[in-house]
Amino acid sequence: MVMDNVIGLIPLFPLLGFLFIGLFINKISKTVAGLIACTSVLVSFVLSIVVFLQLNDTQSSINWTAFDWITTGNFSVSFSFLVDPLSSIMMLIITGVGFLIHVYSTGYMHDDAGHNRFFAYLNLFIFFMLLLVMGSNYLLMFVGWEGVGLCSYLLIGFWFKNTEYNNAAKKAFIMNRIGDLGLILGVIMIFMNFGSIAYADVFPKAEAFGVGSPAITWITILLFIGAIGKSAQIPLYTWLPDAMAGPTPVSALIHAATMVTAGIYMIARNNVLYSLAPFTLEIVTIIGLATALFAATIAVAQNDIKKVLAYSTVSQLGLMFVALGLGAYSTGVFHMMTHAFFKALLFLGAGSVIHAMSGEQDIRFMGGLRKYLPVTFLTFLIGTLAISGIPPFAGFFSKDEILANAFAQNPIVWGVALVASLMTAFYMFRLFFLTFSGTVRATEEVKHHIHESPKSMTIPLMVLAVLSVIGGFVGIPAVLGGSHELNHFLAPVFPVVEGNAHELSHSTEYILMGVVIGLTLVMILSAYLIYVKKKSLPAENETSLNPMHRLVYNKYYIDELYTSVIMRPLNAISKAFDAVVERLFIDGIVNGSGRIVTWGSKTLRLAQTGNTAYYIFGMVISVIIIFLVKSFI
Amino acid sequence: MVVFSRNPIYNVLYLVITFLCVGGHYLLLSADFLFAVHIIVYAGAIMVLFLYVIMLLNLNKETEPQKNTFFKFAAIITAGLLMIVIVGALRASEAAMVAFDNHNNIGLVKNLGKMLFNEFLLPFEIVSLLLLTAMVGAVMLGKNHMKRVKEVAKNKNGRATISTLPVQPVKELTHE
Amino acid sequence: MNNVSEAIQGVPLNYYIWLSTTLFVIGVLGVLYRRNVIIIFMCIELMLNAVNLLMVAFSAHHNEGSGQVFVFFIMAVAAAEVAVGLAILIVIYNNTKSTDINILNKLKW
């Protein structure tokens, strides 16, 4: 079918964009590069829509094989794509939000010298992310997984002349790799147990293993470790706040909307396996909860716009993992979708603010930007309302669904998740008020340059704002009178397993909703009172904080902990190895063999005296030796 | 005597005596033709050649250099070792200690000639070629190059000067 | 004469091996011991003779003619070698005015 081949084109266009821009990086002008990049993603987006519509009609997944990739012995992998409801939603998000961010970047990176390089990397990232979600086997997913890790490294360290940024990029990549070890081991175990690594082979056979079998449990735990690294959960989350060293569009695309959601995608894809391992699901829930709460507490005390948003991302990812851990896979995907919208919006808005403030990122020096940046103000407000879970914005529906599922399973989980959500509302509005309301605290020369961002930046903001408003409407639960279209759409992917269906009575749901909304409004009000009415500002420097505050402000000193516990011993070991093994041993052997050869040749050379009598002597001696040897053999 | 005597002429003469003895052994082994050829070729031609060269080079007892003692000692020991090794190697074959009938006819010229020209024809021809080569080489090596030098001298000076220049400038190499 | 020749019995082979070896070793000793090139040549001839003797002895014992033919060839080769060797020696003497073997040490690096 024509439609099937279209699937192959979807990742192809960003790849071509990358190649073209990359090869002619210094020869094409900035406008051309930006145009090529945006167009390629736009084409992919249009094709994704086409595929989505077809999927909607026929309700069946599409397979398309490019070629047989590896065929050896028992192991064969084909380079093929699978488009089913889950991957088509992800494709839409990736290409759609990606396209908006590309357009935004043409404005944001306009004055940057590495402009073309940036777009090349962005296109490459879109390509890899599409590979990740479209792959029909674990190997292709892994290729995409590693590829987005690579692009993350390239883009975080985009301004590579700064050593701190390079360190942040390295940190991101290395922490990803730590998680990837788990992923690789998981895939190997899958191959060992199932004999194949294509989804179509693995998932039907998984039933035979039974619930709670050790093999499945181990596989799921290992896969989850990979997700921990990629999606920044405890303990591998410290790279995400540091990754804010990259340009803001990068933070928006990679660390809000797409790459960090790769972990969510993977677990949702493997839902068949995870449903058979309740132990792993508990672990997922616990880690998700811990991360959500932990990151939220840190975010309350941060003063950098992007850091607050970074910790908020970590926290929201935790909530998504909670949803997955509760078995509500489509809820997790739903929240991921809405989160993509409003988090990208928030990041882009922050970028707009930073752009206006000539690079200032500390909210202590912002304020009163409402009258200078009206469009940014409005869109940021919409984003903040969405993330706080105020109806009818997008975040409300998804978050509420998570909370409802949590309450149905375990009220404690619901309680902790609720606390995390309330704190989210609090610190987001704190951020909002400190940035946009009140008096202008910027220095004079910065104040001169404050201006609204160009159209290329504000239009994506507006589009995302609209999406943040209406994005939730695909998931209106039955209790509110809607039919949960998203759940229906995703139903083929997530088979309902016995024992996971949780039904709450409608009245319970109403009460829950009311409680949540009420408490959220209380938090918003308190933020308003503290930061607008009382006009209190965050402390100027650290020493004036009480110890508890300082602890939270310094991110619980986790980075320092990692440095002293993990990095110092590793550095010491590597130095020891270098001194002993490398210098003495290996260099000794290598140089030594050279020295031995030289010494040997110098010595042997002395045998050639040129003296004929000496040679005759040698001949006679050799004859004797030959005789001896021959007679004794 | 061959080895240890000082005067080279004595060496040659002792060697002649040795050859004669070995020739006598040939006779004992009923190799008549070889005895004759041995005497003629070795004692007659080769030794005479040696004598010519020694007399040409005017070697006598005083100009004979000696090796230093260490090497002499080492030489003796090495030779002794060689003897022991070879004898030891050949001892394993307890070859016939028996007398044999030496009234066979293979030493006769007729039989030897028959074998030479039937089975060993190719080596025979090649040996003749070898002798030719040796002859040409010896002649060429001994040739006097003065004529060429004379011509070169003539061209340089513009008129014929018969100068008896030495063949090559003699380089005094240092003794080690 | 016939009586004499009939009366002479063959000498056993062992003795000939000993004799030949002794001659050969003496030749080797001479080559290592002497410093004059001409004497060394003569000792080489001695070694060749030892080998010749051995060959003839074996041929007589096994009633093979090929031993003697081979001796024939060896003699021819020895003659050729002596001729050429002495010619080279004379040329060298003309150049270096010495017949010391230690002078001839150009065959090195």
Image (spheres, coloured by chain):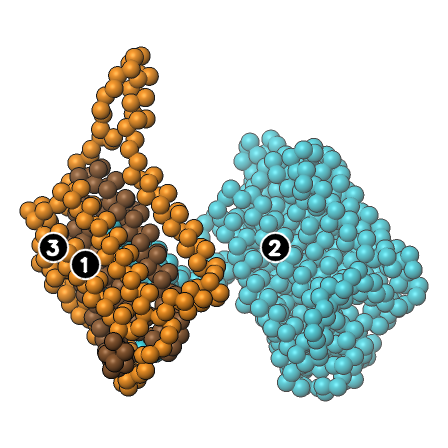
Chain colours: A cyan, B orange, C brown
**Nearer to us: label 2 or label 3:** 3
Q: CA distance from mark 1 to mark 3?
A: 10 Å
- Residue found 61% across the figure and 35% down from its top: A113
C107 relative position to A245: left or right: left
Q: CA distance from mark 1 to mark 2?
A: 94 Å
Q: Amino acid at mark 2?
A: Leu
Query: Can you say which quadrant of the picture contains the C terminus of chain A?
Result: bottom left
Q: Secondary structure at mark 2?
A: helix
- Residue found 9% across the figure and 54% down from its top: B6
- Which residue is label 3 attached to? B10
Q: Which chain hosts label 2? A: A
Q: Nearer the viewer, residue A541 or A120?
A: A120
Q: Amino acid at mark 1?
A: Val
Q: Is residue A507 above or below residue B37?
A: below
Tell me the crowding category of disc 2: few under 14, some 14 to 19, or many 20 or more residues within 10 angstroms, Cα based. Answer: many
Q: Is residue B153 visible?
A: yes
In the rendered image, residue A290, in percent from the top left (x then y), is placed at 59, 71
In the rendered image, residue C12, in percent from the top left (x then y), is placed at 26, 81
Same subunit, labels 1 and 3: the answer reads yes
Q: Secondary structure at mark 1?
A: helix
Q: Answer whether labels 1 and 3 touch (C-beta < 8 Å).
A: no
- Residue found 62% across the figure and 36% down from its top: A112
- Which residue is label 1 attached to? B16
The image quarter containing residue A261 is bottom right
B63 relative position to A225: left or right: left
- Which residue is label 2 attached to? A150
Q: Which chain hosts label 1? A: B
Query: Of all residues shown, which one is farthest toward the top?
Result: B158
Q: Is residue A421 visible?
A: no
Q: Is residue A314 above or below residue C35?
A: below
Q: CA distance from mark 2 to mark 3?
A: 94 Å
